[in-house]
Amino acid sequence: MRMVTGKELDKAILKSQGRTWDGMPISELKDGYLIRVAMLAFYKEPEKWVTGAYVKIGHFAQSDADLKYQDEVYGSLIEQVDKTVDLVYAKYMKALISYEGIQRIEQFMFHQDAFREILLNAIVHKDYSSCNPIQISVYEDKIYIWNDGKCRKIWIQRINCLQNILQNPTILSWQMYFS
């Protein structure tokens, strides 16, 4: 028989009660009642309550070992989305520039709305109990976004895909505030 401990035990207990990590109250509060998702979404320093509740961005040259510069984005999850998108497009991604007459046209690797949606998915599906930040690795020709969430393999029309396992249903229901 396998022994279940730590984070795995916590998840099993919550599941047996029909609850999830993000909907649990913060027990350290002296007055009032605040669930974790509200603290993550709106509190200016969620890192005080949840280690790893931030985004880490790095610019790499040719390989993962060739880090050129990096930044960390802190604040409420709502602030992190806006700050991260702005920072990635201002500092990390290069635009192809063309002109139509006198109008300058910038074309990025990804449309800003698409990148924002990918970032929101990383936030919603992150396992916040892991204590690891969301990590964004930007290269000249690609970008990786990683979180410590779980995926399971599925096959759709003979295409090998990964399907997210929802870690934070309460955060997902609050996603309208991030958009």
Image (cartoon, rainbow, N blue to C red):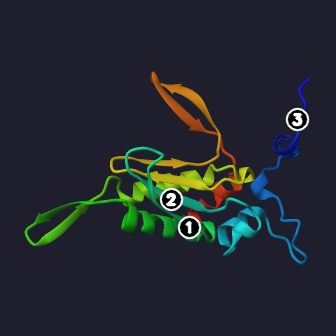
Q: Amino acid at mark 3?
A: Val
Tell me where residue 117 appears, x and y as whole percent.
48, 55
**Circle nearer the N terminus (3, 2):** 3
Q: Nearer the viewer, mark 3 or mark 2?
A: 2
Tell me where residue 142 appears, x and y as whole percent.
38, 46
Q: Amino acid at mark 1?
A: Val
Q: Are marks 3 and 1 in contact (CB under 8 Å)?
A: no
Task: Return the residue at label 2.
Answer: 57
> Which residue is painted at 84% across and 65% down in the image?
26
**Circle nearer the N terminus (3, 1):** 3
Identify the element where label 1 is drawn. strand
Identify the element where label 2 is drawn. strand
Tell me where residue 141 appears, x and y as whole percent.
33, 47
132 shown above or below 92: above
Q: Are marks 1 and 2 in contact (CB under 8 Å)?
A: yes
Task: Return the residue at label 3.
Answer: 4
Which corner quadrant of the image does residue 174 belong to? bottom right
Residue situated in front as seen by the camera: 27 or 20: 27
Compared across the picture, whether 143 is left or right of 121 comes to left
> Which residue is painted at 84% across and 63% down in the image?
25
Identify the element where label 3 is drawn. loop
Task: Return the residue at label 1.
Answer: 73
Tell me where residue 45 appears, x and y as whole percent.
69, 73
